[in-house]
């Protein structure tokens, strides 16, 4: 079991729903991986961009889906996302759209980290590799073959 003061890698993803067309697809799987201990949600914010390009954060329960209760995610906020983060997401979505911004902790690696720490090792850094960085590295590898 991982110690309480050890965290797994923390990641984020922002997903745009054009024209505010949110469906249960994805949210059902999100709930499943939370329930099975794969991730822990640290923040889930819904950002609405109005026709005049103004932004507002709304609770998940704002969206009434016929086949899924999004209100299960109300209150999933840690304060990790600030006004600057919301503004950055707002720049990338179209007017009339909604973005779900998810900050989550990867829990699957915690037993590995805990075992290393128990044996005297220490975690010295963590980081995120973007999809663009991965693609660049793979392209570079292909070019050098």
Image (spheres, rainbow, N blue to C red):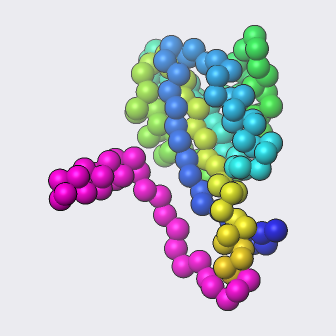
Identify the residue at the far front of this view.
Answer: 145
Residue drawn where x is 47% and y is 58% of the image: 128
- In this view, the residue in front, 98 or 12, is 12
Measuring from the top left, give residue 62's x and y in whole percent.
71, 21
Q: Is residue 89 left or right of residue 67?
A: left
Q: Which residues are magenta?
A: 118-145
Measuring from the top left, give residue 142's x and y in whole percent.
23, 52
104 to 95, vertically: above or below: below
45 to 103, vertically: above or below: above
Q: Is residue 143 left or right of residue 124?
A: left
Measuring from the top left, give residue 31's x and y in whole percent.
75, 35
Quadrant for the C terminus in the image: bottom left
Residue 140: in magenta span: yes
Residue 132: in magenta span: yes
- In this view, the residue in front, 9 or 16, is 9
90 to 144, vertically: above or below: above
């Amino acid at each position: 079991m991982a110690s309480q003061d050890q965290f797994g890698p923390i990641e984020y993803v922002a997903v745009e729903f054009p024209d505010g067309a949110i469906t249960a697809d994805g949210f059902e799987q999100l709930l499943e991986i939370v329930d099975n201990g794969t991730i822990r949600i640290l923040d889930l914010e819904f950002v609405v961009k109005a026709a005049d390009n103004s932004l507002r954060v709304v609770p998940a329960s704002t969206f009434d889906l016929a086949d899924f209760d999004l209100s299960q995610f109300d209150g999933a906020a840690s304060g990790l996302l600030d006004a600057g983060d919301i503004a950055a997401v707002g720049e990338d979505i179209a007017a009339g759209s909604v973005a779900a911004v998810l900050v989550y902790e990867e829990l699957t690696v915690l037993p590995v980290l805990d075992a290393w720490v128990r044996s005297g090792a220490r975690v010295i850094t963590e980081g995120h590799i973007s999809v663009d960085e991965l693609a660049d590295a793979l392209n570079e590898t292909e070019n050098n073959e």
